[in-house]
Image: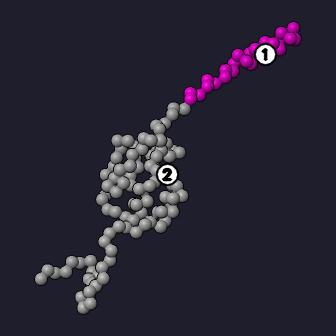
Amino acid sequence: MKSLACLLLALAACAGSKSPAPAPPPTPGPSAGECEVGGCSGTSCTEPGQQMMTTCEYKAEYACYQSASCERQTDGKCGWTQSADLVACLANPPPTAGPPPTQAAPGNPQQTSSIAPNPL
C-alpha cells in the first residue's frame, strides 16, 4: 500500500508540470550585403530603399568613408564598421583636394578676406 501511495504522489507531481515548448529558432536577419551607401558626399549608410537627403558640403573626413565598410552591424542595423583604419583616418583626415595655394606677386598683396573685392 505504501508503494502505491508513493506511486500516486509521483504521478500527480509529474502530471501537473509540463515542459515548456522549445523556443522557435531565431529569424535570420537580412544579409550583410543589403546596406547602401548614399548621401551627397557618400557618408550615409542605410537600409535598402531608406536613403536620406543630406547636405552637399564636403569635409576632409568624408574621404575616410571611400574605403570604409557600410554593412549590417551587431545590432542588426546598417552602419559604418569602425575598423582601425577608419578610426585612424577620422582622427587625422587627409587634406581636402583643391587648387594649390598661390604666391602673391611682388607689389600685389594677396587678398586675405573672404569678401570678394569690388569690381573696378
Q: Estimate the spatial distance between the alpha carbons at disc 2 and disc 1, rounded to whole Å.
A: 59 Å
Assign a secondary structure to mark 2: loop
User: What are the residue bounds of the magenta stretch?
Assistant: 1-25
Q: Nearer the viewer, residue 103 or 39?
A: 103
Question: Which residue extends farthest bottom?
Answer: 107
Q: Give the mark toward the camera: 2 or 1.
A: 2
Q: In which quarter of the image is residue 100?
A: bottom left
Magenta part mainly helix, strand or loop? helix
**N-term mark: 2 or 1:** 1
Residue drawn at (21%, 77%) of the image: 116
Residue appearing at x 39%, y 60% in the figure: 62
What label sits on residue 81 in the rendered view? 2
Q: Which quadrant of the structure image shows residue 107? A: bottom left
Q: Position of residue 61 (x, y in %)?
A: 42, 63
Query: In the image shown, does 104 or 88 lie closer to the viewer?
Result: 104
Report the side of 38 relative to 79 (left or right). Answer: left
**On the image, numbered disc 1 is attached to which residue?**
9
Q: What is the tally of numbered marks visible in this picture?
A: 2
How has the structure been colored for display?
A: one colour
Q: Dot 1 lies on which element? A: helix
Amino acid marked by disc 2: Thr
Residue kind at label 1, given as amino acid type:
Leu
Report the front residue among 74 and 32. 32
Above or below 84: residue 114: below
| Residue 110 % position (x, y) | 27, 84
